[in-house]
Image (cartoon, helix red, strand yellow):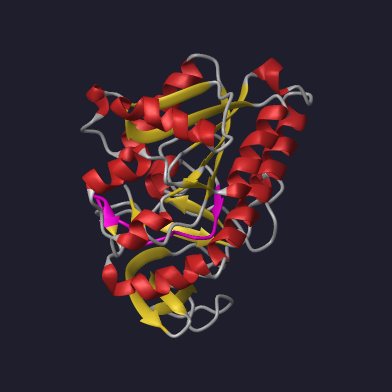
Amino acid sequence: MNQTLAAVALRTTAVGIVLTVVLAGCSSSSVSRSADGASFEVSASSAVSVQVADSPPSVGKGSGPVTKFHAVVAPALGTAPAEGNPWVNPGSTAAGRPTWGTGQNLPPLTATVPYFVGPGFATEVKAYYDSGKALRQQAKIATSAFDWVKERIDNQCDGNPRSCKATVVFDVDETLLSNYEFYKGTDFTFDQDGWNAFNEACMSTPIVPVRRLYNRLRTSGIRVVIMTGRAEATRSWTQACLEQHGITDWDKLILRSPGETGLSADAYKSGERAALQRAGYRIFASIGDQVSDMSSGSLMAGFLLPNAMYFIP
């Protein structure tokens, strides 16, 4: 049963930040029932889904993209990652490609400009990260990504990833490197000058499970491409910080060129992936913390890491 997302809301509870998703024509208090106008709640601290499906979701229609959350994978998509990692189809831009993760991270799901959670949820966001829950979810997604990619390459490249230019794309911020300490200091708002100073000084920290995934893939012969929304002008200190944190030997490090400044993250990253494919790279997966890291095609699947701090369309 596939439903259309009708509305979302974010509220605070004693157990954390709760995203309430209202699904048109969906079930009541249980995903196994059906009655109109049901609400489902998904905690930012739990890797849970809000909808169960036995087939790929239909593409929603409306003023913006529709994001749907699923706890199972259709047989045509191959072996699902570990239980508890639902896959999400991020609207019409996904073109049916599966994305596994902890669920859409922040509303508004149809935002066209970046959204930062702000001080109103600072207590809950800090609890989520400081408790280690974010790290545990990151580790779960990283493990699922490795298993999925390895299985696909064994099947499609005869176990020889270099022969078919098998590639995995990684984002930087909140994927390979964490800026949590910066955002905690700003009450989860954004300050460009402060962010630049923080990262130029390499005050970010590595997200260890994702770094481990990166290195496991690289040493397995899989090409790794790092693709970030950071500006080309930051290349020298972005590269230095990655290397300082043990992230090295990438095949390509792609940053946003001056000509791409006005593009959305979705348009910029999908365009760069398409260029990689034209150059012969076979992109098995994209690893990132935003749906825009893996939407609009030119990849086989995406793995969405949790980010309770901001949303970039």
Residue placed most toward the observer, 198 or 149:
198
Is residue 7 highlighted in magenta? no
Q: Residue at x 44, y 85 (%)?
A: 14
Place of residue 55 in the rendered image (x, y in percent of width and height, measured from the top left): 59, 55
Q: Which residue is drawn at 64% across and 45% down?
A: 145
Q: Residue 219 lies in what quarter of the image?
A: top right
Residue placed most toward the observer, 53 or 47:
47
In the rendered picture of this protein, how many numbered marks are placed on residues? 0
Q: Residue 311 lies in what quarter of the image?
A: bottom left
Magenta part, dominant SS: loop
Place of residue 147 in the rendered image (x, y in percent of width and height, measured from the top left): 72, 44
Q: Residue at x 33, y 72 (%)?
A: 121
The answer, for residue 25, to whether it is visible in the render is no
* Left or right: 167 as drawn, with respect to 256: right
- Extent of the magenta region: 99-115
Place of residue 241 in the rendered image (x, y in percent of width and height, measured from the top left): 46, 35
Place of residue 198 in the rendered image (x, y in percent of width and height, measured from the top left): 34, 45
The answer, for residue 244, to whether it is visible in the render is yes
Residue placed most toward the observer, 149 or 194:
194
* Left or right: 293 as drawn, with respect to 77: left
In the displayed image of the protein, which residue is found farthest to the front? 201
Q: Does 206 sit above or below residue 225? A: below
Is residue 102 highlighted in magenta? yes
* Left or right: 111 as drawn, with respect to 225: left
* Left or right: 86 as drawn, with respect to 110: right
Q: Residue 135 lies in what quarter of the image?
A: bottom right
